[in-house]
Amino acid sequence: MTTITVQRKGKKGDEHHHHGDYNMHLWLSPEIARLSAVAIHEKLVELMPQSRAKLDANLKDF
């Protein structure tokens, strides 16, 4: 399993209302999307090494 840790940035009082312990707006972050794509790529290559060239090309296009 791959885990991505995200540190909060911003000024005090710059927080948004959300429920629970997770900020559901993280999926909007281009950096989080890139990190997620890399983690997914690594796992897919592990599961399907024969498809590495296509997976590499897809990640590069992303």
Image (tube, rainbow, N blue to C red):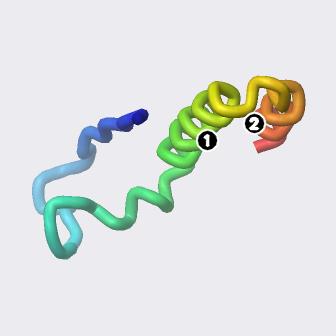
Mark 1 belongs to which amino acid?
A: Ala
The quarter of the displayed image where residue 37 is located: top right
In the picture provided, is 35 more to the left or to the right than 42? left
For the C terminus, the quadrant is: top right
Asked if disc 1 and disc 2 are in contact, CB closer than 8 Å, the reply is yes
In the picture provided, is 20 more to the left or to the right than 52? left
Along the line of sight, the residue nearer the viewer: 47 or 7: 47
The quarter of the displayed image where residue 25 is located: bottom left
Residues at marks 1 and 2, CA–CA distance in whole angstroms: 7 Å
Any mark on residue 27, and which? none
Label 2: which residue?
A: 59
Mark 2 belongs to which amino acid?
A: Leu
How far across and how far down the image is residue 28, in percent? 49, 61
In the picture provided, is 23 more to the left or to the right than 34? left
For the N terminus, the quadrant is: top left
Which residue is rendered at x = 84% and y = 26% of the image? 50
How far across and how far down the image is residue 19, in percent? 17, 75
Along the line of sight, the residue nearer the viewer: 40 or 14: 40
Along the line of sight, the residue nearer the viewer: 1 or 4: 1
| Residue 23 against residue 19 in the figure, above or below | above
| Residue 57 against residue 14 in the figure, above or below | above
Dot 2 lies on which element? helix
Label 1: which residue?
A: 37
